[in-house]
Image (cartoon, grey):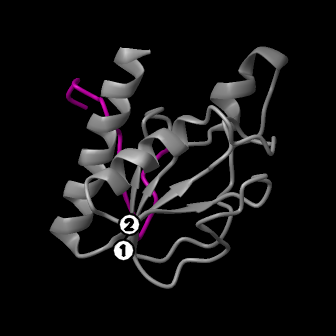
Amino acid sequence: MHAREIQAKNLAHFLIDHAKQHGMSIVIHGKAYKPDVPYCIGSYSTLVGHYIKEAGFGVRYLDPLADDQNEVITELAGPTVILWAHNRKITYEYTGDQPETLPYCPIPRGSIIVDPWRKLPDIEGLTVVHYGNTRSK
């Protein structure tokens, strides 16, 4: 549990650093504890969000199914730092072929997507950061 909290805090500060550097807000793509479910209790996304708020920075979420709609938005007004928290292929791969997770709303050009799963390809007009990737490409 302690390691999970340290990882969440480190990820929160990584997001904050990018947001400050580029003058953007932070949005977490997925509030529930995994894709396609509504349950937010025990969600890693909300733990990361807690550390973002603890550091004095704002955070919002994109998740149409979340049973806790507090701080959930349905669209992005401009370029944003986005934590790609939900990844259907990673979560449900054991069940067989899974479709890619599509964004819950259009992502504005110039946004930065932080992908802790390190599975998103380069996307034209966006910056994809594979968080935790210590290997050179």
Report the disc number at residue 110. 1
Residue 128 visible in rendering? no
Secondary structure, magenta segment, majority class? loop
In the depicted structure, whether residue 41 falls above or below residue 124: above
Mark 1 residue element? loop
Residue 82 visible in rendering? yes
Give the residue drawn at x 43%, y 34%.
118
Mark 1 Cα-neighbour bin, 10 Å: few <14, some 14–19, many ≥20: some
> Which residue type carries mark 2?
Gly
- The answer to which image quadrant residue 99 occupies is top right
The residue at which mark 2 appears reads as 58
Residue 122, percent across and down?
A: 42, 52
Residue 133 falls left or right of residue 101: left
* Residues shaded magenta: 120-137
Q: Nearer the viewer, mark 2 or mark 1?
A: 2
Front residue of 130 and 42:
42
- The answer to which image quadrant residue 92 occupies is top right
Give the residue drawn at x 68%, y 46%.
101
Mark 2 residue element? loop
Give the residue drawn at x 78%, y 32%.
98
In the depicted structure, whether residue 101 falls above or below residue 94: below
